[in-house]
């Protein structure tokens, strides 16, 4: 499980500038938007290089899509992206991560757990 529930907007990076500058850039972009709406529309299991990820898929509104693109473009010069992150930032998957780095065996057990799947499906609604 993630220690802090969150929605990923930009994949793994390290700041090249002070945290204050990152916050300033984020604030500048955020101030241009006021309706960042989304819905959880399904739970998803994806296989990555470091194991499986379980997440709630997000169906964003157009403003949230544009916000994420603007945020990435505005931060790009101030961050160092992990080698593989650039691909993911440019081919973005809107999601809220639940757990990651899972084994095939554990994902198999989770996907067969009817009660867990039933509870997870309750979250697929408007936020």
Image (cartoon, rainbow, N blue to C red):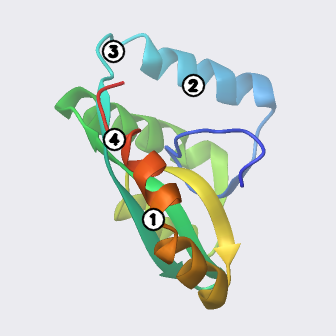
The residues tagged by marks 3 and 2 sit, at their Cα atoms, a distance apart of 14 Å
Q: Position of residue 35 (x, y in %)?
A: 29, 15
Tag in front: 1 or 3: 1
Asked whether disc 3 touches disc 2, contact meaning CB atoms under 8 Å apart, the reply is no
The residues tagged by marks 2 and 1 sit, at their Cα atoms, a distance apart of 44 Å
Q: Where is residue 28 in the image (x, y as percent from the top left)?
A: 49, 16
- Quadrant location of the C terminus in the rendered image: top left
Is 98 located above or below residue 51 in the figure? above
Indicate left or right for 84 with 58 as reference. Answer: right
Mark 4 element type = loop
Mark 2 element type = helix
Tag in front: 2 or 4: 4
Is 19 located above or below residue 10 in the figure? above
Q: Mark 4 points at which residue?
A: 124
Q: Mark 3 points at which residue?
A: 33
Question: Which comes before the other along the chain, label 2 or label 1?
Answer: 2
Image-quadrant location for residue 50: bottom right
């Amino acid at each position: 499980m993630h220690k802090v529930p969150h929605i990923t907007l930009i994949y793994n990076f390290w700041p090249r500038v002070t945290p204050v500058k990152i916050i300033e850039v984020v604030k500048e972009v955020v101030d241009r938007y006021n309706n960042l709406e989304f819905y959880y529309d399904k739970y998803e299991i994806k296989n990555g290089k470091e194991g499986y990820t379980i997440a709630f898929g997000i169906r964003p509104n157009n403003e949230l899509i544009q916000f994420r693109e603007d945020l990435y473009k505005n931060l790009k010069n101030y961050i160092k992206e992990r080698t593989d992150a650039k691909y993911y930032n440019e081919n973005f998957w809107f999601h809220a991560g639940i757990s990651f780095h899972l084994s095939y065996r554990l994902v198999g057990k989770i996907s067969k757990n009817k009660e867990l799947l039933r509870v997870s499906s309750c979250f697929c609604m408007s936020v």
